[in-house]
Amino acid sequence: MIRIITTGRLQQLEQDADRARARVREVQVQADTALGRHVHNAVELTARAEQAEAAASAARWDKDIAKTEAKRLREQIGELEAALERAEATTDEVGVLLSHAMDALSAAQQELLLKDGEIRRLREELEGESMEGRTLTVLLHHGEPHTVYASREDAHADTATHGGGPDTVWRPCDDRPPAAFTWRLETFIYNPVSNGFRRLHMPAPKQIEGAA
């Protein structure tokens, strides 16, 4: 079997590639935002700890007041240490988020590369292959298109897919309409005038009553 490459398919792949690029940008923004938030929290907590230490030093001028202030500052420092521990835990969470974000970014980049490669390949096929003289074999089921094959031989080899045995014999069709046959093969050839495929053997035109 072959796959007919269409402009619609190429456009769909380009749209998929655009969405993959947008996903890459979105993941990068999320990673940058998480890292910036972590850095801001760490800087803020460090500044608060330094302010507490400076206030403790300034309180030493009076022993009684210093004891009370020191106790309060120790409690504050304890709270700050607890906050720093929570910040470290947050750092681990941010690390996990960044790791997931990088994995997602890598996956999105790989998908983008695959899409770009497929688009380039399809473009090369569309631009480099000539359709002149190409034929396709269409399998009809009660007159309706069912499967398209590169050749009649491929269609015969695929008989088992449609419930037939490997020894199935294909016979020439009579003049009955295609819908009268359960399975029927029709050969189509590329027509450069219409830029499409038409039947290789066109049915004989029926005479219209009253025509001279």
Image: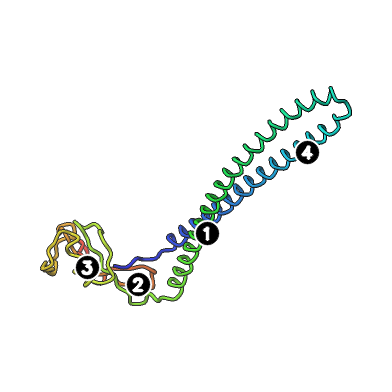
Q: CA distance from mark 4 to mark 2?
A: 82 Å
Front disc: 3 or 2: 3
For the N terminus, give its image quadrant: bottom left
Residue at image coords 67%, 46%: 36
Q: Nearer the viewer, residue 194 or 97?
A: 97
Q: Nearer the viewer, residue 107 or 198?
A: 107
Q: Which mark is residue 81?
A: none
Q: Are marks 3 and 2 in contact (CB under 8 Å)?
A: no
Amino acid at circle 4: Glu
Mark 3, Cα crowd under 10 Å, few <14 / some 14-19 / many 20+, is some
Q: Are marks 1 and 3 in contact (CB under 8 Å)?
A: no
Residue 62 percent location from the top left of the image: 88, 25
Amino acid at circle 2: Asn
Front disc: 1 or 3: 1
Q: Earlier in the sequence, mark 2 or mark 1?
A: 1
Residue at image coords 47%, 62%: 115
| Residue named by callout 4 | 50
Residue at image coords 59%, 40%: 89
SS for callout 1: helix
| Residue named by callout 2 | 191
Residue 94 percent location from the top left of the image: 59, 45
Q: CA distance from mark 4 to mark 1?
A: 43 Å
| Residue named by callout 1 | 109
Residue 209 visible in this rendered orientation of the protein: no
Residue at image coords 65%, 34%: 82
In the current view of this chain or complex, which residue is farthest to the right?
A: 61
Amino acid at circle 3: Ala
| Residue named by callout 3 | 155
